[in-house]
Amino acid sequence: MTPQDAKPVRFEAGRAVLAVVRLLPQISRPRTALFAATTVLVAALPLAMTIATGLLIGAVPDAAEAGPGSPEARHTYVLLGVGVAALLLGRLVNNVHNANAFNLGRELELLLQDRLVAAVARPAGITHLEDDEVLALLRIARQLGGDFIRPERAIRGLAAIAPEFLSAAGASIVLCLFNIWIGLAWLVAWPLIFIAMQNEYTRVGKTAYMRSTEMRESEYMRDLAISAEPAKEIRVWGLMGWLLDRYDRQWNERMAYTNRFQRLRARTAVGVVGALLALTGATALLLAQSGLDGAVGFAALSVYLVALTTMFNFSAFDDTAAFLALGALPVPKVLALESTLTVDERPVTAELPSAAPERTVTFANVAFAYPGSERPVIEGLDLEIEAGTSLAVVGHNGAGKTSLVKLLAGLYEPTGGKITVDGVDLAGVDPAVWRTRLSALFQDFTRYQLTVRDNITLGAPHLADDTDRIWKACEPMGIRDLIDSLPNGLDTVLSSEYEGGTDLSGGQWQRIALARALFAVQAGAKILILDEPAAALDVRAEAELYEQFLDITAGLTTIVISHRFSTVRRADRIVVLDGGKVVEDGSHADLMALGGRYAEAFTLQANRLARTPLA
């Protein structure tokens, strides 16, 4: 963020607060109406007490002179009763007001979190999760639970400041009865002072929280230092000192930038305080002069003085005002994220038969480049996959293998050409419906810190209670004994971070993930994609795993991705990708006879394997 980026905050604080207010009816219209009513009462009752107190102060001398039982004394008792009643009722209403504000604030955070998750989940693909603008908004929105940047605090700040605002406005009107210009000056001054300070709080918040790209790097350094996953390497290589030094240096650079804008806040505060002191001095001087001259009676003078003190119960410089500004800050960002991640309105113009694919899946002259890149990863790809067969896609790193399966899964859309299933163009098919026909296991599969049952049944969550189906998916992977040995069997949490939980070895995790893929097949998936899920294994173990899996999935449309040519020779068909195109196509025997890239790479890897001693 440059200094020019930090300037347009003049009205941003007000827009953020208005965004918060507009969301309240979506939580509860009755409670929002109660919030509005108690806001008025919390402002009006202290004002009534203020006026009654001022009149009471002025009435006491006359009541004392007239004596008990006199009309003057009874008038004093009435004023006292009004003041006490306003005080007690005000406290009761204030308690209701604050409790309602707390509940509204808590539910506002839940609403925003729900809308954030829904917005991120809305696009059919994953392109948005690699877009820098979206990532910047996501970083801001993720701070919804942060200490200072909580919408719940914004509601509580609004609950405190809105009545004070109304009280100050009422006190200004009372002062208008003394001097119209003084009253109007206060009526205008306090909103301007408050807005000026809110803008400064917002400016500080933007510089501290909104420099998303830079702050993401600092936060990444921090998370490396405190996370378990990189802890081993960091300690073995002695990186902690370097890591902390870099984090401190980056953080200090960010904060130095922020502090420059905090000085702007200090200058604004000095100007605001100067104007406030001048207005207070002028009001006090006029009141004193009017009292000495006898132009204003003692009772009226007391009311005006108490009204003047009410002006200083108005929060503009304290934490309440800061929480209102900072807490409201992420709300427009969440709403902007919703607008940015618009629903994929690609019309559904085609439907797949329930048994598809029955014949073929076809890539016809397909081209693809990742968003923000002009270099195509796939260009002019023609590939026909027969249903019910096993296809191995091999090639060196960067050949386009993973991009191919991402396109097939609808995670990205081709930039050219088309993908068809039994002749139906996937561009016209609902992606969610198409994905029910797919089961996939990627190299970077997720290790969910959930139970064994969850880790397997996430392949088809609607069948999570079908224990027999779970065991059916586990048995080919040879992990039933492993699961039975765990403390709680299928209900054991796979994370040592939880009480009673446990962690697994890399190979055990891979078999759990493969069981998850099989579970999806049992639920009706027609195509199984294995994208180098065993790349971390040695070549012998990977070959054994693939052979076992090809036996298990015989008759299913299976697509196996690998950069190891020697592990997939049992596939019905093998294609070699290079530069995003198919350069060789055939069975293992065909390609070996061809003597091309596959044969060369297979021989090289097989010879290396033959020279590798068994462990």
Image (cartoon, grey):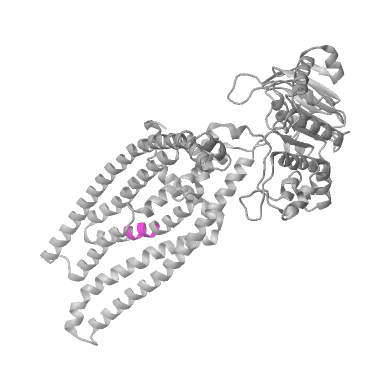
Residue 361 included in the magenta stretch of the image = no
Determine which quarter of the picture holds residue 473.
top right
Asked if one can make out residue 350 in the rendered structure from this viewpoint, the answer is no
Q: Main secondary structure of the magenta part?
A: helix
Left or right, 87 with respect to 334, comes to: left
Magenta region: 162-168
Residue 527, above or below 71: above
* Residue found at the far top of this picture: 595
Camera-nearest residue between 421 and 42: 421
Q: Is residue 282 left or right of residue 122?
A: left
Counting from the top left corner in percent of width and height, residue 430 is at: 74, 36
Residue 303 rendering spot, x and y as whole percentages: 24, 67
- Residue 409 sits in which quadrant? top right
Near-viewer residue (223 or 260): 223
Residue 246 seen anywhere in this rendered image of the structure: yes
**Quadrant in which the C terminus appears:** top right
Q: Nearer the viewer, residue 174 or 345?
A: 345
189 up-or-down from 214: above or below: below
The residue at the point 22 percent across, 76 percent down is 59
- Residue 407, given in percent of the width and then of the height, sits at 71, 28
Residue 440: image x %, image y %? 75, 36
Q: Quadrant of the N terminus?
A: top left
As drawn, which residue projects farthest toward the bottom?
A: 69
Count how many numbered circles sit on residues in the image.
Answer: 0
**Is residue 165 on the magenta stretch?**
yes
Residue at image point 67% right, 42% down: 447
Left or right of 62: which side holds 30? right
Residue 479 position by quadrant: top right
